[in-house]
Amino acid sequence: MTSTDATAPGADRAPHTTEGVLTALTGLIRHLASATTVVEVLTALVDTVVDATEATGAAVLERHATTGRVEVAVDTGLDLPADQAALATLWATSDRDRPQAWTDAAGVPPPLRGLTGWGAGLVIDVGAEEPADRVLLVAGEHAPAHLQSCRDMAMAVAPALDALRQHQRMARTRNLLDRVTELAARLTRAGTVSGLLTALVEEVADLDVVTATVVWRMVADPDADRLVAEAEAGPGLRVLQHGMDEAVERRIRGVLAPGTSRAGRAMLGAPAPLADGRLLTLLLIGEDPRRALGLLHDRPLDPEVHGVLSTLAGALGPALVNAGLATERRTLLGTFSRTLRPGRVPAGTDIGVEHHPNTTAAESFGGDFFDWFQPDEHRVLLALGDVAGKGVPAAAAASMAVWSLRALGRQGTGPNVLARLLDTAVAEELGGERFVTLALLDIDTTTWRVRMVLAGHPAPLLLRQTTPLEELDLHADRPLGVMPLGPAFTTHERQLEPGDALVLFTDGATEAQAPDGQRLGRDRLRAAAEAAWTPGAVRASEMAGALWSAVHAWSGGPPDDDCALIVLRRP
């Protein structure tokens, strides 16, 4: 007998009773209720078919809708064609409405001819609303007689396959939401372009449906634009990193080519099959026509997954622009602040500094500033100041004060005259909008006689080598910039003996607040200095570090204001 359909002669002849088939079908449905994977469902199908129909074997072929590849999903050890083209031809013989059956060699489908066990058999469509199409193959002389029973069993698994598909889609959606939530948190913490792109590829690569991710960017070059991978994550990247297929590279270049419309780029970005059978999807990042996110995946992306990732990649554009601008600003401010730092500690002195601006945008330069330099061989000018206010405007005013101090301080004038000149310069530059407090020390490194001016700045602490800490009851004059034609500034003098030290600080130290709102204050700062001071055994840097630790501990973290501490010690 040749090929037939469900009404072909012999279709109602069965060695097993109808009751036995119904029992097998009931058992299959019961087994499907506990199945958790597609493989379990399909295995239950072929096992039941073999048991209920005395078939010599059964198998399920599966064709992926996007790639067109046909694979053997499950089988019971049948002799099946190994060639992809033969499997595709065999799959094509299935028709949902007209299954194929044969009872002699003349009716055997060409891909099965010559293979053991296929003298009689049938091919039936496994109906299911899935992206993958499946067919059931049954071998054995009695198989055609059980065509309708096998068809009923194939139809019975369709609801189970659809339910698993829905469950898997829900699981993928939950996974997607988890990754998007984590990505959003990471993006808020990432302050650089590389940080944003790394967060993007790592979180997307963690999706169940994605095996690897890459961000490509087209970099302009005089000879030919270069395709560069800026960030990448996930296993299986070799196909994208080494020996990329020319067709795939042309597609990426087509998506990122200048002048290509957004609609054209989106069309070029449709999933493309790679040589290893996986798929590559390209998603545009922001409005930048030269950067795209590449997704490597084994199966087609669900529409909701594709939509969320496409929206996410598109929305990342402004964040990348802002991160780039912020990086440029940090680089500029960092370079600028480094030019305002003093040089090496002058020979024969011991100076320790703790400088902690609270303005992260200005990095290491805020409203507090410090400087030292040598106007001549045996003199050192040391200054610690504080500009009223916070943030970048205060940092800009502080930079003006430092440059003015350097320009005016090398004229050989005493600290009171220098303070008067700085007073005028600050008033002219800031126009009365801000003022500056300043502790200015003029140190004779031969005698270690220190002359100082306190322009609205707190008096330093004096740590003696031979006696306890000395409280300096010094009067502070007005801040710089509030009364440029006012009275002259007072010069205070102190003699430092070997091992003595002066501790200068800004109000960010004394006004540091504990969690309950109490301020550290001068008395507690002095107590911290006494606790850390061991005459002759503590260097200036160690003393400054101990005082900063006390401030940090008091406030339970970095204080709200800029904070600077300088310890000057006579060796």
Image (cartoon, rainbow, N blue to C red):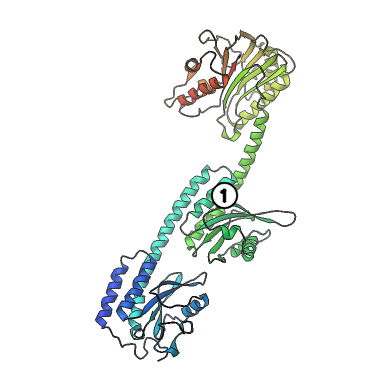
Across and down, in percent, residue 522 comes to 50, 16
**Whether residue 371 is visible:** yes
Q: Residues within 10 Å of mark 1 (few under 14, many from 20)?
A: many
Instruction: Compare residues 149 and 184 and report the one nearer the observer.
Output: 149
Question: How many numbered discs sit on the rendered protein?
Answer: 1
Residue designated by label 1: 197
Which of the 4 quarters of the picture holds residue 167?
bottom left
In the rendered structure, the answer to whether residue 329 lies left or right of residue 561 reads right
Say which residue appears at 68% left-offset and 55% top-offset.
226
Say which residue appears at 35% left-offset and 73% top-offset.
45
Across and down, in percent, residue 484 comes to 68, 17
Say which residue appears at 50% left-offset and 54% top-offset.
204
Which of the 4 quarters of the picture holds residue 42?
bottom left
In the rendered structure, the answer to whether residue 277 lies left or right of residue 378 reads left
* Element class at badge 1: helix
Work out whether 286 lies above or below 279. above
User: The disc labelled 1 sits on which kind of residue?
Assistant: Leu
**Whether residue 438 is visible:** no
Say which residue appears at 68% left-offset and 60% top-offset.
259
In the rendered structure, the answer to whether residue 72 lies left or right of residue 453 reads left
Quadrant for the C terminus, please. Answer: top right
Which of the 4 quarters of the picture holds residue 224?
bottom right
Residue occupying the far left of the picture: 19
Across and down, in percent, residue 133 comes to 45, 73
Work out whether 203 lies above or below 468. below
